[in-house]
Amino acid sequence: MKISTKGRYAVRLMLDIALNDSGEPVRIKDVAKRQDISDKYLEQIISILNKAGFVKSVRGPQGGYLLVRKPEEYTIGMILRLTEGSLAPVSCLEYEVNDCPRQDQCVTLEVWKRIDDAVKGVVDNITLADLIEWHHQKGDYYSI
Amino acid sequence: MKISTKGRYAVRLMLDIALNDSGEPVRIKDVAKRQDISDKYLEQIISILNKAGFVKSVRGPQGGYLLVRKPEEYTIGMILRLTEGSLAPVSCLEYEVNDCPRQDQCVTLEVWKRIDDAVKGVVDNITLADLIEWHHQKGDYYSI
DNA sequence: GAAATTCCAATCGAATTAGTAGGAATAATA
DNA sequence: TATTATTCCTACTAATTCGATTGGAATTTC
């Protein structure tokens, strides 16, 4: 039941870009340094976010990445699902159609559904904007 | 974010033993047949449940396994944690002490905590007795 | 003593994870 | 125009985990 580094890094990556948005593109190299993550690995992750239209890229020197939308328009669920794939705890909940031959008798399915709903309830109700706010609260607390 | 077959099979295994409890020990071979799971694999899983004292074994012919406690005393969380290991979505939530050097600045930790709490809220509040009840409800529905 | 069961340990192929490595394409700037 | 800084793309890889399979030893009943 782990969230992979890919998903976790993607969230930190998006948050870092949001926090360091000065209008100029944010370089992956800088994010990697700040977040202490391999820049080559971050490149692969940002490429997913880029292709999905979550960020836009500027190539060449002074290049980098910018968020396409406002932070409040990205939920954690969107970012995790894009990078991790489905967040469902079992594969029979991943698609519209459940073709499991045991599903009529399957009582445990109800358990997995409830877990799924609980997770969704969390990740689909937290946005990047929330993370930014929490970050500032932490910052204020530590600067007193 | 998947629950492995080991954990899922363990729940089905416990439920199957509970449903087929006639006072006589329940054989793994029969569970395997009913649940359509490899009996050799189930052996490994029941061994974990046995060592943890969730079931007791009777060796030899007419042997098998029996639940030690009443179904309402087993939560799904107990079974999953035993067989899967921790259900926490990130490893820094697994132990009492979080030794992550970034934890003071880590805003995403709050997200993982909320996911963790949400999952716990589900699995720690469903017992084997609930699954038995749901099973009978399903059975009644399909027999009308 | 034969048969049915649990118990135990080793092995294994496939998939996944978490990256590394190397360089091509692009664009700003000197 | 040459240099340099960046994104972009593809391939590879080492380690781990997953989901078993295999083979047999120990125990107990009949």
Image (spheres, coloured by chain):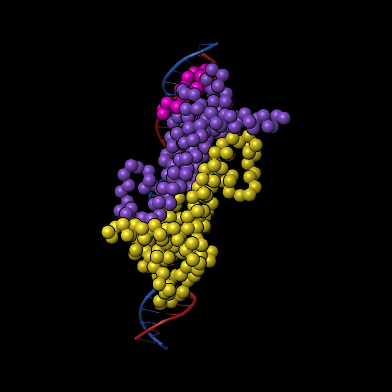
Chain colours: A yellow, B purple, C red, D blue
Residue A107 x/y as whole percent? 59, 35
Residue A110 in the image: above or below residue A133: above
Residue B87 x/y as whole percent? 44, 42
Residue A78 x/y as whole percent? 52, 57
Left or right placement of residue C2 versus residue B47 in this view = right
User: Which residue appears at 48% of the width and 32% of the height?
Assistant: B75
Q: Is residue B1 magenta?
A: no
User: Which residue appears at 58% of the width and 39% of the height?
Assistant: A109
Residue C28 in the image: above or below residue B46: below
Residue A97 x/y as whole percent? 65, 47
Q: Can I make out residue A103 in this image? A: yes
Nearest the camera: B6 or B134?
A: B134
Nearest the camera: B62 or B139?
A: B139
Residue B36 location, quadrant: top right
**Callout count:** 0
Q: Can I make out residue A51 in this image? A: no
User: Which residue appears at 58% of the width and 48% of the height?
Assistant: A94
Residue A132 location, quadrant: bottom left
User: Which residue appears at 57% of the width and 23% of the height?
Assistant: B20
Left or right placement of residue B27 versus residue A128 in this view = right
Q: Is residue B65 magenta?
A: yes
Of the 4 image quadrants, the one containing the C terminus of chain A is bottom left
Question: Magenta stretch?
Answer: B51-67
